[in-house]
């Protein structure tokens, strides 16, 4: 488990929590009661009460509501001439007395509608100086909670002896924020949730677009970084008061989360461990090394590290890869333990078998990955290769060279082995890398990332490879088109489509792997059986597995179709058919031809000839990998020339479409894009070009003094 995940692991054990409701949550901008918001809050508390949580509330808002009611009363009782006079503000204690009555009446009504009972407890600072009072308070709250009653606390400003109750910050507590922190300690709560009108603590005023939300407050880091804006529009101290109270509670042993009271179900999300709001915890200093830097900082750090990597010699970059391979093998046992924990959790959660299959690191997988990295390390250095050399003019030499793209963002699901392949390709190609894996592989990805980055020397820095730990960070990363150069999503069609529609950054990848095998009438049927079976059952969850089998109509009468179907059924493949195959084979009809099963199932359809097969593939395929099995080479050539897919095969399984099998060392993914890279994307797909011009003082000067030769000097 990563440190950032560990910081919220305690939430699963929370039983008693104090919820502090700010004035800005209780009231609207005009000072009137925010009934809709309060109703949603009470529904959340009712659900928590039903789930067995012990909920204690501390609410603000009485003074604001009282002022609103007194303003209305003064308006009703005043003459026109009275209203022309200077209006003196109301006494705060009077506002508190009137507003407290209204506030509790609202809570009582809302909770009664939900079949929940609430109780009012008004306290003052002076009360807590009495030990007997504190003991009685604890006993009263224990009794109420045992009866599933919701205690609602508020400072009794109407009779408080505080001289300036809206400014004074002295005493045992000085506002409802500090009261909530005090009660959390007195009543031995497991958590304090403070609801505000913003999502949490920001590095600056939330209205400033440069401010960023702080997910975990680390006093040693954030104390000097934060700039507070204006105080709350209605409460006493706004975020400044909340942070002060949160720090006091957290460092006394009560974790605190400040989050929005506007967002629905935020309290429940907090208790479920979601990274909602800002967490304050006494152990936060232990996570200082893993400070939650923003996406921009992570991308900039990856770029800086990539430039240091590019500055190394080819041999030094090769050595890094070899050390990564050795580190993986040395930590194989630890990696497998973490992976097995992920697989067990996925099985317990009832995730799809195809996902669990991709998640598991099978025996020998780590050794295989390490060997692939060594193959990649021993390949020719791809950086700075001269692709073309041209003599522009006498003494003027132009070179087109290979160059890293910069910073890559890879979003992938399930497969932790993809992290290893992608990382090794990034190192070989000199690119910085940000990785976001699926939560189902969280432990596997964390240990693999740690092993790999530990093997990267300090001269480059482990920040070359950044691991994004929260799904919430992806939308922000996709906006960073000035610091991230390429996005490669690896996962479901839904994931790929969503990313493509959410960013200006170039995206390469494939939305679906709808791969076809067409068996022509001229096919060698023994060969066809081997190809079809391998394409389907070698690894059904792979994107290059066969999803649709197309068969020439003549094979229906010759018996070839029945032979293929019998073999597929023997291997346990579930069959669905197109309109013609359904009638002929008496199998269920496929709801669509554009479907990626990722399992032991496929679609079968009968077609007239190779031209019909090509049309079918163009209409229903995903331009990934398609194959023809045929002995008629003219037919095969038509298929190979006309099928517009990233990979087109003749008499070979679609499963060969793979970076390692193509000799690329590894692959970052398979692209069906038509720009930049297509098919398995290896090192070359992660490179761009640079033009280098070497001269001896030449100037253009209107092209009068240059005689262009443009002689190709490429060897």
Image (tube, rainbow, N blue to C red):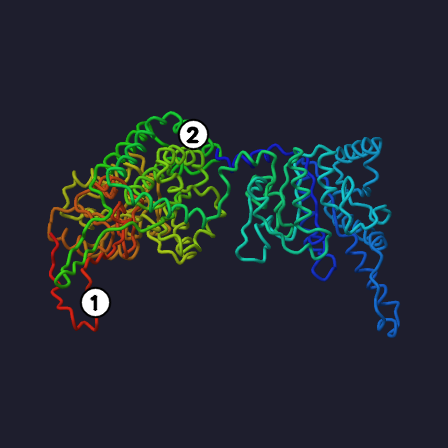
Depth check, front residue: 321 or 571: 321
Q: What crowding class fits label 2: few (fewer than 14 Cα within 10 Å), some (14-19), or many (20 or more)?
A: many
Image coordinates of residue 42 in percent, x first then y, are: 70, 47
Give me the residue at 23% from left, 51% from top: 402
Relative vertical location of residue 427 with respect to residue 67 in this rendering, above or below: above
Q: Is residue 712 left or right of residue 194?
A: left
Depth check, front residue: 715 or 548: 715
Q: Is residue 422 left or right of residue 295?
A: left
Q: Which mark is residue 73?
A: none
The answer to which of marks 1 and 2 sits earlier in the sequence is: 2
Image coordinates of residue 191 in percent, x first then y, are: 65, 37
Q: Total of numbered circles in the picture?
A: 2
Q: Which residue is mark 1?
A: 699
Q: Which residue is mark 2?
A: 338
Element under label 2?
A: helix
Image coordinates of residue 272 in percent, x first then y, are: 58, 39
Depth check, front residue: 413 or 623: 413
Q: Work out whether residue 359 can be spotted.
A: yes
Image coordinates of residue 643 in percent, x first then y, are: 21, 55
Give me the residue at 39% from left, 28% from top: 336
Element under label 1?
A: loop
Q: Is residue 37 left or right of residue 219?
A: right
Spatial CA span between label 1 and label 2 = 62 Å
Q: Is residue 619 left or right of residue 609?
A: right
Give me the residue at 75% from left, 40% from top: 150
Q: Nearer the viewer, mark 1 or mark 2?
A: 1
């Amino acid at each position: 488990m990563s440190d950032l995940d560990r910081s919220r692991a305690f939430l699963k054990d929370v039983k008693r929590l104090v919820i502090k409701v700010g004035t800005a949550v209780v009231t609207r901008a005009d000072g009137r009661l925010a009934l809709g918001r309060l109703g949603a809050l009470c529904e959340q508390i009712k659900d928590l009460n039903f789930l067995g949580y012990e909920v204690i509330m501390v609410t603000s808002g009485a003074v604001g509501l009282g002022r609103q009611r007194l303003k209305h009363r003064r308006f009703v009782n005043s003459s026109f001439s009275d209203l022309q006079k200077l209006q003196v503000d109301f006494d705060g204690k009077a506002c508190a007395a009137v507003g407290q009555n209204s506030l509790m009446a609202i809570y009582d009504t809302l909770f009664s509608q939900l079949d929940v009972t609430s109780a009012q407890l008004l306290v003052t600072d002076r009360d807590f100086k009495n030990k007997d009072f504190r003991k009685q308070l604890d006993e009263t709250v224990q009794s109420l909670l045992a009866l599933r009653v919701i205690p609602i606390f508020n400072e009794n400003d109407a009779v408080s002896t505080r001289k300036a109750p809206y400014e004074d910050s002295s005493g045992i507590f000085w506002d409802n924020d500090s009261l909530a922190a005090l009660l959390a300690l007195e009543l031995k709560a497991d958590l304090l949730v403070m609801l505000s009108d913003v999502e949490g603590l920001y590095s600056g005023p939330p209205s400033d677009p440069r401010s960023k939300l702080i997910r975990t407050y680390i006093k040693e880091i954030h104390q000097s970084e934060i700039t507070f804006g204006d105080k709350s529009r209605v409460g006493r101290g706004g975020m400044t008061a909340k942070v002060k109270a949160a720090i006091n509670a957290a460092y006394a042993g009560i974790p605190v989360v400040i989050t929005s009271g506007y967002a629905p179900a935020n309290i429940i999300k907090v208790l479920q461990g979601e990274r909602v709001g800002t967490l304050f915890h006494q152990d936060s200093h232990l996570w200082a090394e893993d400070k939650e830097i923003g996406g921009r900082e992570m991308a900039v750090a990856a770029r800086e590290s990539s430039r240091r990597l590019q500055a190394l010699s080819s041999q030094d970059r090769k050595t890094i890869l070899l050390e990564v391979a050795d580190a993986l093998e040395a930590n194989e046992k630890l990696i497998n333990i973490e992976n097995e924990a992920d697989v067990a959790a996925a099985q317990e959660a009832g995730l799809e078998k195809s996902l669990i299959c991709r998640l598991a690191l099978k025996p020998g997988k780590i050794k295989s990955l390490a060997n692939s990295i060594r193959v990649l390390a021993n390949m020719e250095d791809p950086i700075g290769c001269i692709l073309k050399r041209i003599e522009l003019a006498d003494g003027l030499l132009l070179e087109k060279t290979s160059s890293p793209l910069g910073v890559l963002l890879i979003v992938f699901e399930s497969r932790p082995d993809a992290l290893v392949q992608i990382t090794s390709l990034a190192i070989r190609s000199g690119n910085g890398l940000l990785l976001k894996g699926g939560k189902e592989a969280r432990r596997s990805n964390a240990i693999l990332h740690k092993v790999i980055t530990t093997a990267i020397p300090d001269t480059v820095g482990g920040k070359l490879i950044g691991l994004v730990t929260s799904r919430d960070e992806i939308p922000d990363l996709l906006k960073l088109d000035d610091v991230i150069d390429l996005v490669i999503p690896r996962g479901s069609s839904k994931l790929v489509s969503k990313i493509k529609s959410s960013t200006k950054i170039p995206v390469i990848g494939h939305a679906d792997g709808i791969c076809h095998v067409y068996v022509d009438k001229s096919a060698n049927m023994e060969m066809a059986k081997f190809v079809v079976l391998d394409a389907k059952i070698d690894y059904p969850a792979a994107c290059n597995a066969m999803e649709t089998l197309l068969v020439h109509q003549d094979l229906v009468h010759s018996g070839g179709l029945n032979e293929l179907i019998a073999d597929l059924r023997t291997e346990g493949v579930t069959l669905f058919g197109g309109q013609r195959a359904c009638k002929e084979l008496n199998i269920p009809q496929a709801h669509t031809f554009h479907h990626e099963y990722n399992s032991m199932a496929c679609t079968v359809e009968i077609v007239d000839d190779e031209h019909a097969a090509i049309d079918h593939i163009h209409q229903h395929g995903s331009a990934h990998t398609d194959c023809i099995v045929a002995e008629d080479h003219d037919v095969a050539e038509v298929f190979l020339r006309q099928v517009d897919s990233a990979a087109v095969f003749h008499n070979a399984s679609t499963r060969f479409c793979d970076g390692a099998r193509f000799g690329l060392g590894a692959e970052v993914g398979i692209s069906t894009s038509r720009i930049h890279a297509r098919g398995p994307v290896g090192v070359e797909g992660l490179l761009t070009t640079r033009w280098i011009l070497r001269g001896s003082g030449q100037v253009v000067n209107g092209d009068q003094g240059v005689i262009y030769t443009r002689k190709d000097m490429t060897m």
